[in-house]
Amino acid sequence: MMDGHSRSAKLLVRSATVVSALTMLVFGMWMRIDPPSFAEFAQFPNHTHFLHDAGVFQIGIGLMMLSALVWRDVLSIALGGFIVTNTLHAINHATDLELGGSPDTWWQLGLVSLLALAGLVAHRRQLKAVRARETARNV
């Protein structure tokens, strides 16, 4: 990442990414765990399900930002972030059934997460195979 950039630029980018990601994670977990308290803090209406959803989307963004510091493959980052976010979203719909919504939404979202997981696994296997072929050519 950032080949050819100065050490201070690399530190700035990493620091900005980590602080921003942690901010997203902290506020996202707060919305997910204690929606009334977050609603009061943010002066939002206390709508539990929507705050749960907003929280998991914030969590997903934070995790994607952190994974970008580890993985260099954009598709892996996007699929991984989607899988986490969409799966947490499915869990919200399963646990918030008494708040309304379709009783089928949770498992439909879960199926899409499984499809994305299959895509991520296939993609990572393809990357591994390409690397193995490149390594074999360079030997």
Image: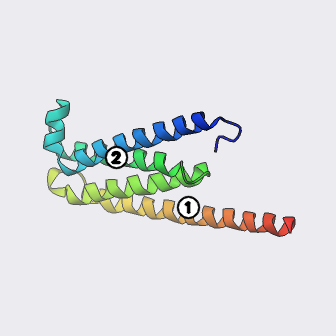
Q: Position of residue 113 (x, y in %)?
A: 43, 60
Residue 126 placement: quadrant: bottom right
Q: Position of residue 62 (x, y in %)?
A: 41, 46
Going by the image, does 119 lie left or right of 126? left
Question: How busy is the neighbourhood of tag 1: few (under 14 within 10 Å), some, or many (20 plus)?
Answer: some
Residue type indicated by callout 2: Leu
Q: Which residue is mark 2?
A: 25
Residue 123 placement: quadrant: bottom right
- Given the current orientation, which residue lies at the most extreme front position? 7
- Given the current orientation, which residue lies at the most extreme top position? 43
Q: Residue at x 42, y 44 (%)?
A: 61
Question: How busy is the neighbourhood of tag 2: few (under 14 within 10 Å), some, or many (20 plus)?
Answer: many
Nearer to me, 19 or 101:
19
Q: Which residue is mark 1?
A: 120
Q: Is residue 45 visible?
A: no
- Secondary structure of the residue carrying numbered label 2: helix
Marks 1 and 2: in contact by CB < 8 Å? no
Q: Nearer the viewer, mark 2 or mark 1?
A: 2
Going by the image, does 127 lie left or right of 98? right
